[in-house]
C-alpha cells in the first residue's frame, strides 16, 4: 500500500469486531510511525500510553461522550503532549506536532489492516482532567491529547473527505 492509498483508504471506524487481537509487533509499528513525525525544532513533545486493560478502556468510554466505540475495540493509544519541552522558537507548537504523530498512527493502522478513530481530548479541560484521573497522570506537564481507538473494523464507511477546488488558491 502506498502512502496515497493509505490516505485514501483511512476512515474513522466506530464499530469493531469484539475480541480481535492486535499484536505487539503491530503496536510497535504504529508507535514507530508516530515517532517519525515532524515536530517543531525536533522537540518531539509527545508520549504514548497503550491501553489494553478492559476496565480502563470502559472507564474512558464511560466519561468520553464520543468514544463509546471503545467498548468493542481491541486497544487504545493515548497520545500525551509535553508542552513544557518546547521553549524559545518551538514554544506552543505541540498541538501540530501531536496531530502529525496521530495521523502517522492512523495511516500505519490503515496499512496494517486495522480500523482506527481519533477521539479528541485536548483542548477540552474537563476531558483532559477525566483522562488524567483514569490514567493516573499526576504530572501537570503531561497533557492527554487524544485517544486513538484501534481494532478490527466491523463496518466499511464511505469516505467523508473530499477534494474542494474552491479551498485552493494559486499565486
Ligand atoms: C481533533 C479530532 C477530534 C475527533 N474526535 C472524535 C471523537 O471524539 N469521536 C469520534 O467518533 N470521532 C472523532 N473524530 C473523527 C472525525 O469525526 C472524523 O475524522 C471526520 O468525521 C471525518 O471522517 P473520516 O475520519 O472517516 O474521514 C475526531 C477527529 C479529529 C481530527
Image: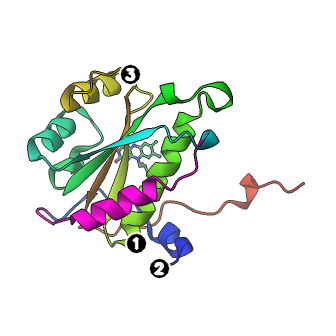
The magenta span reads 18-39
Q: Residue 154, image x and y in percent?
A: 23, 67
Q: Which residue is mark 1?
A: 111
Q: Which residue is mark 2?
A: 1
**Residue occupying the point 44% across, 50% down:** 102
Q: Residues within 10 Å of mark 2 (few under 14, many from 20)?
A: few
Element type where label 1 sits in the image: helix
Give the foreground label among 2 and 3.
Answer: 2
In terms of depth relative to the viewer, which is nearer, 168 or 94?
94
Q: Residues within 10 Å of mark 1 (few under 14, many from 20)?
A: some
Residue extending farthest to the bottom is 1
Q: Residues within 10 Å of mark 3 (few under 14, many from 20)?
A: few
Tell me: residue 17, above or below residue 150.
below
Q: Residue 24, image x and y in percent?
A: 23, 63
Q: Which residue is mark 3?
A: 125
**Residue occupying the point 46% across, 52% down:** 35
Q: Say left or right for 111 vs 38.
A: left
Mark 1–mark 2 Cα distance, whole angstroms, equals 6 Å
Amino acid at each position: 500500500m502506498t502512502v496515497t492509498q493509505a490516505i485514501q483508504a483511512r476512515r474513522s471506524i466506530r464499530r469493531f469486531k469484539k475480541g480481535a487481537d492486535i499484536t505487539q509487533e503491530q503496536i510497535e509499528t504504529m508507535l514507530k510511525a508516530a515517532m517519525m513525525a515532524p515536530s517543531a525544532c525536533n522537540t518531539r513533545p509527545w508520549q504514548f500510553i497503550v491501553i489494553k486493560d478492559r476496565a480502563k478502556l470502559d472507564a474512558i468510554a464511560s466519561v468520553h461522550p464520543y468514544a463509546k466505540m471503545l467498548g468493542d475495540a481491541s486497544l487504545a493509544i493515548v497520545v500525551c503532549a509535553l508542552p513544557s519541552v518546547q521553549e524559545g522558537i518551538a514554544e506552543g507548537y505541540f498541538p501540530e506536532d501531536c496531530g502529525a504523530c496521530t495521523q502517522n498512527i492512523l495511516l500505519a493502522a490503515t496499512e496494517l489492516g486495522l480500523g482506527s478513530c481519533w477521539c479528541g481530548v485536548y483542548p477540552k479541560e474537563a476531558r483532559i482532567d477525566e483522562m488524567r484521573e483514569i490514567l493516573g497522570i499526576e504530572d501537570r506537564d503531561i497533557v492527554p491529547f487524544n485517544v486513538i481507538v484501534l481494532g478490527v473494523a466491523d463496518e466499511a464507511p464511505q469516505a467523508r473527505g473530499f477534494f474542494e477546488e474552491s479551498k485552493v488558491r494559486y499565486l
